[in-house]
Image (cartoon, rainbow, N blue to C red):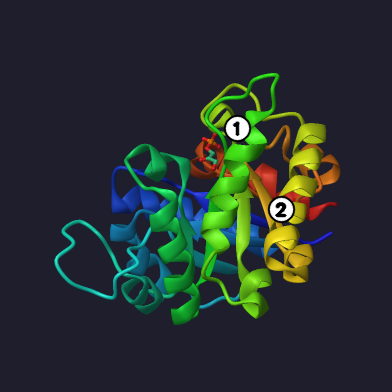
Amino acid sequence: MKSIVVANWKMNPATFKEARKLFEATRKAAESAKNVAVIVAPPAIFLRELSVGYKGKRLSFAAQNAHYEAGGAFTGEISMSEARDAKCSSVIIGHAERRGMGEENDDTRRKVVAALTIGLTPVLCVGERTRSQSGEHFEFVREQLVAGFADVPPAKIPRVIIVYEPVWAIGAERPMNARDMHEMAIFIRKTVVDRYGQGGMNLKILYGGSIDESNAEDMIQNGDVNGLLVGRASTDAEKFSALVSALGAL
Ligand code: 13P
């Protein structure tokens, strides 16, 4: 079974020397697991040096974030074209940590189209902060999806990769239950199909939140997902290699 693994290094590691070492281990892991497509998202400042030096095909690069404007007075931001120029083929949009810093549904809407327009794959993150018995989280996720796809031409819908990452399971002790993910995957497809048409049936859906080498296989086999977005375990060379090889064996 082919799966996608996004290695989101977030704001790690502290030096380029360590980044190069981690990348080397990541590359080896990706090259030994033929049915796992690894997408590495290093900090922007390390990206180009890693990507231009990589000549293989087993691994691709993502920006952790990019602005929807083509250029201008946006201190501290990078643009979609700058990300593409640094050999990114995808961009993470609306990660919970960016949303926590003020990114809104309207920003993610613009970023998704901006990415598609320039030929980058948007990796659109959605997920509620908390859950209660009443099921309001479905409505919350529905709004994030409706906004994210609002300006996407129907033919391009299947090009968007969705990551469901419940905020309460990020940086936590364990991931959400795979059966609950299965339910959410059905909900995500249905929401996009109901609102924007059949393209939603072909969406790739990933799960993110406390995935490591011990639970990745269960989530892939029982969560109805095409892959995983991995934070902490992607910056630990041993854990990440074990995770990729576990999925490679499926
Ligand atoms: P952790 O894997 O560190 O929980 O982070 C995951 C994440 O950011 C999910 O999108």
Q: Position of residue 132 (x, y in %)?
A: 64, 20
Pair 1/2: label in front? 2
Residue position for label 2: 191
User: Which quarter of the picture shows residue 209?
Assistant: top right
Q: Disc 1 marks which amino acid?
A: Ser
Residue at 28%, 64% in the rendered image? 78
* Image position, residue 208 (x, y; %): 61, 42
The foreground one among 178 and 4 is 178
> 17 or 99, which is in the foreground?
99
Q: How many marks?
A: 2
Residue at image point 61% right, 66% down: 160
Q: Residue at x 75, y 38 (%)?
A: 181
> Residue 213 at x, y = what percent?
68, 37
Left or right: 213, with 231 as reference point? right
- Mark linked to residue 90: none
- Residue 233 x, y percent position in the rendering: 56, 38
Q: Of the numbered discs in the image, which one, if any, rests on residue 210?
A: 1
